[in-house]
Amino acid sequence: MSLGASSELDVLLQKANTCVHNNQLDTAIELFTKASHLDPNNAFVYDMRASVFVLMEDYEHALVDASKAIEIKPNLSQAYFRKGLCLSLLGRMEEAIFTLEKGLEINPKNTTMLQLRSDLIEYLMSKQNNENTNNISLGGGDLAPFSEEEKLPVTVLSGFLGSGKTTLLNHILNNKQGLKVAVIVNDMSEVNIDAELVKQNSSFSRVDEKMVEMTNGCICCTLRDDLLQEVSKLAKEKRFDYLVIESTGIAESLPVAQTFFFQDQYGKMLSHYTRLDTMVTMIDCLNFMKDYTSEETLSDREMGISKDDKRNIVKLLLDQIEFANVIILNKTDLVSEEQVNKLEAIIKRINTYAKIIKTSYSKVDLSLILNTRLFSYESAVKTPSWIKELQSEHTPETEEYGISSFIYKRRKPFNAQKLYNIIKEGCLKGVLRSKGFFWLASDNKLLYEWSTAGETLYFAPKTFWFSSIPKEQLEQIPPEKLLELQSQMKCEGKYGDRRQELVFIGNKMNKDEIISILDSCLLSEEEMSKEMEEWETIYNNPFKEMLECNDHSHEGHHHHDENEHCHH
């Protein structure tokens, strides 16, 4: 394609994406169609048009476009997700699963595809067992929602395998002070070992209390419908004072919480009959740092839902920590006081809202985890800790046990190759967690996402910068509205909202050194004197090349060679 045609294509794509943001979907389709005529062999154009057809619920056309994108670029994993989604929405479940498996061969760590595939398999299995399963009902007929006083309060216990959840459950049952407690215990194996341990080691009353065993699956995915049904039954019996749910060690907390707000075919929700009270996450002080710095997936350790469970252990740990109201640092007797304090400092940086309890043998004051009324679904979903860090005007930078955090902000673009090199060489030493977005001189239209946790690093284009919208389209926005949008997007000067904004949390980080290393990757004043269009012809973009090459053993992820050295 000629330079002129390439420029025209970029303009069309920018206009189309703006229309999508403004919900002008018909116009977006017209623009993507023009783009496909201009460059008929561009798989991304067909894939983007497919995504708009999905928004319009035109799944037949979306399927055609996703298939075309795969035909042009067989290693474009996102097109397989789009095609699988369309097939499932058209009721062609087996074909959808087959398509998703093809996509996962290309990108085995795509969590969205993994989840959709898991959901579809679960659906088919449920359908085989009960043809009416797709019409989920909480039962109870016309039973009206309970008053706040009538609702059954619920505490959910999460935490990685071996963190002490079952021991905590036994502690609750042995010290429940007259409460009639119902218990749901989830175990991945066919035999619920945790449930058996609870029965043997606690003062569990089979007359006044009830235990529900959920086996051979995980309540955050494959057994989610079962969880919904069982909680509903327990609440409607109206004979229990409290419900405690022990999730399996590989369960993510957010989907479990969402189950309480799932609406059945009659408009009923568990939250009409229960009150999700506290999300508790257990941390194994002895093994946390080893797990947190691991690159392994659950299937690598043979811990997954299946051999295809490619969820990263670090990501799972973060999910469990970030969605907790109470975090229990357990097994403090197995590590030094300094190690406990350092771990506490790390957890505080990851989740600034949660209450932290330090203990051994899972012994805690039950008033700290039962009837706390700490859980707020709206707050938990809308304000992850890292967003709070980015939005704060001031972040304390004083070190506590060697743990510190800071925000890196700049209004210059990175030289992509220099940035790629310092990441590959492992120059950002001491960083445990970082997240945000960044600007590359070689790609001025796209905002790139930055996310690292331990040894797992992820970088990928996320969306368009607001300031990349063509001038003629901005002129169509009323001046007052445009000023408001520019203020919201933090636009400044010539480059608008383009900027670097990254949060770093680390152990014994050298803040000044990290800032110096990152600054060395920015364009110099002399380079800044050139126009953006010229930058894109001068500098290459290894991040984009990495994604296009689909090196999916490390797609968007890196680890450094100890023999490599940092230069800045």
Image (tube, helix red, strand yellow):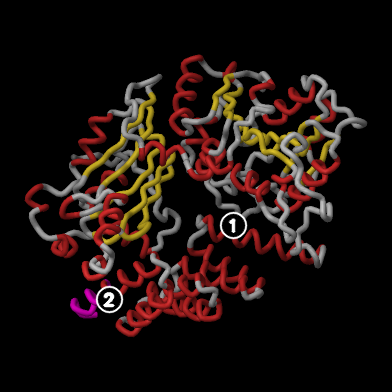
Q: Is residue 309 visible?
A: yes
Q: Compare residues 310 and 495 and report the one nearer the observer.
A: 495
Q: Compare residues 257 and 218 and report the one nearer the observer.
A: 257
Residue placed under numbered mark 1 in the picture: 115
Task: State whether residue 359 is above or below residue 53.
Answer: above
Q: CA distance from mark 2 to mark 1?
A: 34 Å
Asked if the stretch drawn in magenta spans residue 383, the answer is no
Task: State whether residue 429 is above or below residue 102.
Answer: above
Q: Compare residues 151 and 408 and report the one nearer the observer.
A: 151
Give the structural element (helix, strand or loop) at label 2: helix
Residue 537 lies in quadrant: bottom left
Give, as a three-letter code, the residue at label 1.
Answer: Gln
Asked if the stretch drawn in magenta spans residue 9, the answer is yes
**x, y percentage for residue 57?**
54, 74
Which SS does the magenta portion mostly show? Answer: helix
**x, y percentage for residue 427?**
29, 38
Residue placed under numbered mark 2 in the picture: 9
Left or right of residue 274, residue 18 in this image: left
Q: Is residue 197 visible?
A: no
Considering the image in quadrants, where does the C terminus appear?
A: top left
Of badges 2 and 1, the one in the foreground is 2
Give the structural element (helix, strand or loop) at label 1: helix
The span shown in magenta is 1-10
Q: Residue at x 48, y 60 (%)?
A: 107
**How many numbered discs?**
2
The outermost residue toward the right is 207
